[in-house]
Amino acid sequence: MKIVVDTNVIVSGFLNPYGAPGALVGLAACGDLILCYDARILSEYREVLLRPKFGMDAKAVDDFLAQVAADGEATFGVPLSSRLPDRSDEPFLESALSGRAEYLVTGNLKHFPPRLCLGVKAISPVAFLNIFRKTHRRF
């Protein structure tokens, strides 16, 4: 299943491996999900995860990013014709569109109004995991 994951979900997953974002990060780390990304997204993941306030282990971050790059799908987003409420979120939607991702998983649904998402379904980590578990019985 191809998805795009907003940075806030990745950070939440690293900070709390027992919640829905943590489960999602675990699925991505194991290669059970195909994360669509571009260079801007990987760069943002790394920059935010390594902020001193989070106290993340740099090797764990680098290992996760290497896994995403190895098992994910690199995309080349085309600029959107309409701006999102938070322009810094546009790489995520651009990657979802160019990668033909089924979902864009985010903790900020208001940043991705359905009328601007051009058919990409922006959903919460909990909603995504519910769908994933229904379609993948072993989880």
Image: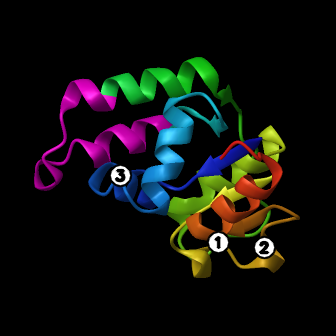
Instruction: Give the amino acid type for the residue marked by disc 2 in the picture.
Output: Leu
Q: Residue at x 68, y 58 (%)?
A: 104
Q: Residue at x 64, y 33 (%)?
A: 32
Q: Can residue 79 be seen in the rendering of this structure?
A: no
Instruction: Give the amino acid type for the residue marked by disc 3 in the picture.
Output: Pro
Mark positioned earlier in the residue sequence (3 or 1) = 3
Q: Nearer the viewer, mark 3 or mark 1?
A: 3
Mark positioned earlier in the residue sequence (2 or 1) = 1
Which label was assigned to residue 76? none
Secondary structure under badge 3?
loop
Q: Marks 3 and 1, Cα distance to the nearest angstrom?
A: 29 Å
Which label was assigned to residue 17? 3
Secondary structure under badge 1?
loop
Q: Residue at x 72, y 41 (%)?
A: 77
Which stretch appears magenta? 42-61
Image position of 133 with respect to 101: above or below = below
Q: Nearer the viewer, residue 102 or 75?
A: 102
Mark positioned earlier in the residue sequence (3 or 2) = 3
Q: Position of residue 42 (x, y in %)?
A: 47, 35
Q: Which residue is mark 1?
A: 84
